[in-house]
C-alpha cells in the first residue's frame, strides 16, 4: 500500500511540475517545428505576393496591357490602385484621362489631370490633353487657354498647334490660324488637308452644317462669347438660316463693328438694301468689313464712292480677293481701265490658285509633285511665300530628287532670308 501511495504522489508531483524543464516527446516537437515553419513560410509568401502584386511597375504594365486590349474598366481599376500607391506620373495621368475619355466620362478624365503642378516641357502634354478634353465637352475658352499654356511650356508640341488650328478654324479667326500654321510648317511637313485649309480657308472634311452644330453647342456653354456668336451667325447665314443667324447676333452691341457688318450682310441677303445702307452708314469708316460692303452698294448704284471704300478696305486687308476684285471693278466703272487692271489680275490670280487647289483634291493628284509644285508657284505669285514653301516641301516629299523643286525652295529661302536681314 505504501508503495502504491508513493507512486501516486510521484505522478502528482510530476503533473504539478512546470512544463519548463519537462521533456517534449520527439514526435510532438517535430510537428510543432514543421507547422510553425509552414506558417512562417505562408506569411512570407503572402508578404512577397502582396509586394509583387502592388509593385508599381507591374501594375503599370498590367494597366497598359488592359488598355491596349480594350479592357477599359480593368485598366481604370489598375490605374486607381496605382494612384493609391504613389503620386501618379505624367504618363499615368494621361492614360487614366484617356481611359475615362474612352468611357465617355470627360469630367473624370479632367479630374485625372488635376493637381499637377509641373512646369517643364513634359507637363505640356497635360495641358494639351486638358485643351482637347475641354474642346470635346464644348468649352472654347478653357480649351484655348489650356492649349496656349501647353505651347508656352513646349513650343514644339505640334499636336497642340493642330488642336488650336481646329479651334481657330471653327471660330473663323484667320489671323490666329495663320500664326499657328506658320509655326507648324517650320517644324514639320504639312499634309495636303492642312495646306488646303491654310490656303483656301475651309476644311476638306467638315461642312457649314457640322460647323454650325458644333458652334451652337459651344455657345450654349458660354452664351457671352462674342466670337462664338459671330462665327455661328456667319455659318447660319451661309446655310440660308437667316432668322437663326439674326437671333445669334441679336445680343451683340450695335457699336460692335463686326456685329454691325453681320447684320448688314443678313439684310442684303434678304434684299433689305435700305436697312443695310443705314447700318453701314452709321459704322466706323475704316473698318474693312463695313468698307467692303459700302463699296458693294456704291458699285451697284454706280456712284464714285466705291473706289474710296474698296481702297479703305484694302489698306487693312490687302490679300482679300473680293476687295481686290471690287476695287478693280470700281476703277473700271469710273473710267480708269488701266488702273483697274492690276487689281482685277490680282483677283484672277487668287481665283486660279483656289482652282488649282480644288482640282488637286483627288487622291492621285494630291500626291503628284508637278501638281503640288504648280500650287506652290501660284502661292508665290500672289505673295503667300510661307504657303508656297509648305507646298514645295510637300511636293519634294513625293520626289526628293527633283532638282527644280530644290532650286525653288533654295531661291525662296534665300529671298526670305534677305528680306529678314533687310
Image (cartoon, grey):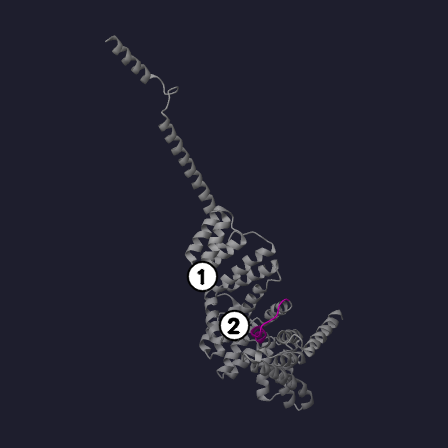
Q: Is residue 191 magenta?
A: yes
Which residue position is annotated with label 1?
Answer: 102
Give me the C-alpha separation between circle 1 and circle 2: 30 Å
Front residue of this view, candidates 173 and 182: 182
Which residue ends up furthest to the left in the rendered image? 1
* In this view, 60 is above or below 217: above
Quadrant holding the C terminus: bottom right
Q: Quadrant of residue 9?
A: top left
Residue found at x 51% / y 66%: 225
Q: Position of residue 357 (x, y in %)?
A: 58, 80
Front residue of this view, candidates 246 and 159: 159
Residue found at x 57% / y 84%: 297
Q: Quadrant of residue 399?
A: bottom right
Front residue of this view, candidates 268 and 196: 196
Q: Is residue 288 magenta?
A: no
For the residues labelled 1 and 2, say whether their Cβ atoms are less than 8 Å apart: no
Quadrant holding the N terminus: top left
Assign a secondary structure to mark 1.
Answer: helix
Q: Position of residue 351 (x, y in %)?
A: 60, 83
Comes first in the chain, label 1 or label 2: 1
**Residue 367 visible in the current orientation:** yes
Q: Which residues are magenta?
A: 187-197
- Label 2, residues with CA under 10 Å away: few <14, some 14-19, many ≥20: many
* Tag in front: 1 or 2: 1
Which residue position is annotated with label 2?
Answer: 231
Amino acid at each position: 500500500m505504501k508503495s502504491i501511495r508513493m507512486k501516486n504522489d510521484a505522478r502528482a508531483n510530476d503533473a504539478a511540475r512546470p512544463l519548463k524543464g519537462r521533456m517534449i516527446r520527439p514526435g510532438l516537437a517535430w510537428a510543432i517545428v514543421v507547422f510553425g515553419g509552414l506558417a512562417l513560410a505562408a506569411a512570407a509568401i503572402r508578404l512577397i505576393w502582396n509586394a509583387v502584386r502592388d509593385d508599381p511597375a507591374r501594375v503599370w504594365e498590367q494597366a497598359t496591357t488592359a488598355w491596349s486590349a480594350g479592357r477599359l474598366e480593368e485598366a481604370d481599376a489598375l490605374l486607381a490602385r496605382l494612384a493609391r500607391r504613389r503620386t501618379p506620373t505624367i504618363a499615368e495621368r494621361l492614360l487614366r484621362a484617356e481611359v475615362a475619355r474612352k468611357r465617355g466620362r470627360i469630367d473624370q478624365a479632367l479630374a485625372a489631370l488635376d493637381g499637377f503642378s509641373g512646369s517643364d516641357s513634359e507637363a505640356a502634354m497635360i495641358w494639351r490633353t486638358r485643351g482637347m478634353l475641354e474642346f470635346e465637352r464644348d468649352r472654347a475658352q478653357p480649351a484655348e487657354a489650356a492649349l496656349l499654356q501647353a505651347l508656352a511650356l513646349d513650343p514644339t508640341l505640334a499636336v497642340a498647334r493642330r488642336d488650336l488650328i481646329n479651334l481657330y478654324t471653327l471660330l473663323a479667326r484667320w489671323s490666329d490660324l495663320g500664326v499657328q500654321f506658320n509655326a507648324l510648317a517650320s517644324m514639320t511637313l504639312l499634309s495636303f488637308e492642312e495646306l488646303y485649309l491654310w490656303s483656301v480657308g475651309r476644311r476638306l472634311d467638315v461642312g457649314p452644317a457640322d460647323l454650325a452644330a458644333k458652334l451652337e453647342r459651344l455657345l450654349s456653354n458660354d452664351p457671352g462669347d462674342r466670337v462664338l456668336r459671330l462665327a455661328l451667325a456667319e455659318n447660319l447665314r451661309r446655310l440660308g438660316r437667316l432668322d437663326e443667324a439674326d437671333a445669334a447676333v441679336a445680343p451683340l452691341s450695335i457699336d460692335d463693328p463686326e456685329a454691325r457688318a453681320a447684320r448688314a450682310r443678313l439684310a442684303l441677303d434678304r434684299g433689305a438694301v435700305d436697312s443695310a445702307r443705314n447700318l453701314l452708314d452709321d459704322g466706323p469708316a475704316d473698318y474693312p468689313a463695313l468698307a467692303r460692303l459700302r463699296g458693294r452698294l456704291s458699285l451697284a448704284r454706280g456712284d464714285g464712292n466705291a473706289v474710296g471704300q474698296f481702297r479703305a478696305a484694302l489698306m487693312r486687308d490687302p490679300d482679300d480677293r473680293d476687295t481686290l476684285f471690287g476695287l478693280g471693278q470700281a476703277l473700271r466703272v469710273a473710267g480708269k481701265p488701266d488702273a483697274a487692271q492690276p487689281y482685277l489680275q490680282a483677283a484672277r490670280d487668287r481665283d486660279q490658285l483656289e482652282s488649282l487647289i480644288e482640282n488637286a483634291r483627288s487622291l492621285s493628284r494630291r500626291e503628284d509633285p508637278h501638281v503640288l509644285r504648280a500650287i506652290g508657284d501660284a502661292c508665290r505669285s500672289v505673295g503667300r511665300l510661307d504657303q508656297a514653301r509648305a507646298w514645295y516641301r510637300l511636293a519634294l516629299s513625293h520626289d526628293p530628287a527633283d532638282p527644280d523643286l530644290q532650286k525653288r525652295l533654295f531661291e525662296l529661302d534665300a529671298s526670305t532670308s534677305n528680306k529678314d536681314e533687310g
